[in-house]
Image: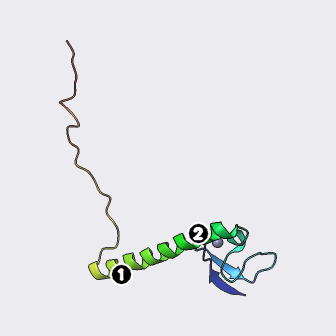
Amino acid sequence: MSERTCRCCGRKFEHPAPASLSTKRDCHDCAQLPEGVRRVLEGHQGEIVRLRREVDQIRAATGVTMPKPVRRPKADAEGDGPVSTS
Ligand SMILES: [Zn+2]
C-alpha cells in the first residue's frame, strides 16, 4: 500500500486499499466517474499543478508569500448622490 495523488482531484489516497475502487491514477471517488468526466478533471488538475508550481517559483523569486487583497479606492461613496430633500 502506498500513498498516491489522484490525477483527477489531487487528493492523496492509499492504493491499493481494501474496499476501495481506486486505481493507480484515481482515488476511490474519481475512479467511479465516467471516462469523459475524469478526462476533464485530469485536465483541470494538471493545470492547477502547473499554476501552483508557477506561483511557487514567483514567490521564491520575489519573496512575496501572501497575495494581498486588492482594494479599490472608494470613489464617490458619499456626498454626491441624487439626493433631494426638498
Ligand atoms: Zn480523486
Q: Residue under circle 2?
A: 41
Q: Position of residue 50 (x, y in %)?
A: 45, 78
The N terminus - image quarter: bottom right
- Amino acid tagged 2: Leu
Mark 1 falls on what kind of element?
A: helix
Asked if the residue at label 2 sits under 8 Å from ligand 1, the reply is yes
Name the side, left or right, on which 58 lies relative to 46: left
Q: Is residue 31 visible in this depiction of the protein?
A: yes
For the residue carrying disc 2, how many other residues have a C-alpha within 10 Å: few (<14), some (14-19), or many (20+)?
A: some
At which x and y percent is residue 72? 26, 50
Residue at the extreme bottom of the image, as rendered: 1
- In-front residue for pair 54/13: 54
Looking at numbered disc 1 in the image, what kind of residue is underneath it? Answer: Gln
- Name which quarter of the figure residue 70 lies in: bottom left
Residue identified by numbered label 1: 57
Q: What residue is rendered at 65% in x and 68% in y?
A: 36
Res. 17 image quadrant = bottom right
